[in-house]
Amino acid sequence: MNVSTALPFQLVYSLFAHEYLGHLFTAHVVQLGPRGQLTLQHQTISAKNAPEFAAGLEKDDYELIALCDQLQQDAVIKEFWPRKITAADFFLKIYNPEKGDKPMQEAVARYVQSRLGRLLAGLQGKHVFIMGRDGEPTWRELKLAPVPASVLFHFRRNDEGTHYFPTIQFQNQRLDFQFKNAVLVCQQPAWLLLDDVLYHFRHDVDGRKLLPFLSKKFIVVPRAVEKSYFQKFVA
């Protein structure tokens, strides 16, 4: 359903989960109602048609929209598979559990994560939502934390080995994130979605080090493998 530029509209960024590529964003323009409310009339906006909606865009939106374009599955496939191939065939070939192309998967992940991280960093002050299952781009509104959180890893050694776990501090308060259905939207750098708020971190935290603790209180590292384990942890 096309949005009229002759009537008020709003640019929004909508978060959704892709089966293989992880969390991605699309950009949409949404028609506003007579009281300024968001309506169900919306359309996707891309770098190609963005100039048509220039009246409702800020300068940095053009770069953010371009990043959204680069994150769409067709753009990803074109980047890594120049020959003609359907999306289904590409993902079945590259992500096959038994015969998948692991180096290609890692390259795709780096491509997606780098662009996703740049996009998230630019969304402060924008209208950000979670996409509904029916494709509705404004299903649930999200907020971005105004300042970065910090992560501290704690290590407790005993006869068994070492127990370690992270705590997250946000605005001088401990953030309760474990067993709360939190989601790592981006892993490198880490962006954590918790209670409809997107949190980023000081020092570009690697989300892979936080991921196990979304559903686990701590990890036990046996004494026999402590040295090798923590060498990998620090790397």
Image: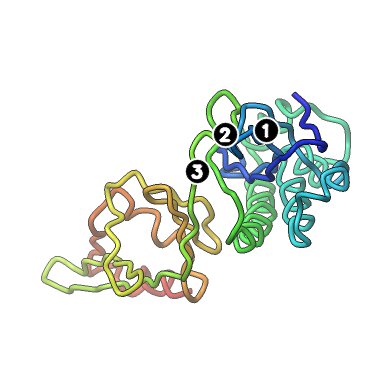
Check disc 3 and report the residue beneath it. 141
Q: Quadrant of the N terminus?
A: top right
In the displayed structure, 140 sits above or below 142; it is: above
Q: CA distance from mark 1 to mark 3?
A: 30 Å
| Apparent side of residue 68 relative to residue 192 in the rendered image (left or right) | right
In the displayed structure, 153 sits above or below 145; it is: below
Count of numbered circles in the view: 3
Q: Secondary structure at mark 3?
A: strand
Q: Residues within 10 Å of mark 1 (few under 14, many from 20)?
A: some
- The residue that appears at 44% across and 56% down in the rendered structure is 192
Q: Which amino acid, mark 1?
A: Phe
The mark found on residue 91 in the picture is: 1
Lower sequence index among marks 3 and 2 = 2
**Residue 62 placement (x, y as % from top left):** 79, 55
Viewer-side residue, 175 vs 156: 175
The mark found on residue 19 in the picture is: 2
Q: Secondary structure at mark 2?
A: loop
Viewer-side residue, 99 vs 71: 71
Lower sequence index among marks 2 and 1 = 2
Quarter of the image holding residue 21?
top right
Q: CA distance from mark 2 to mark 1?
A: 9 Å
- The residue that appears at 23% across and 64% down in the rendered structure is 222
**Residue 42 placement (x, y as % from top left):** 69, 31
Q: Are marks 2 and 1 in contact (CB under 8 Å)?
A: yes
| Apparent side of residue 118 relative to residue 151 in the rendered image (left or right) | right
Lower sequence index among marks 1 and 3 = 1
**Residue 211 placement (x, y as % from top left):** 40, 54
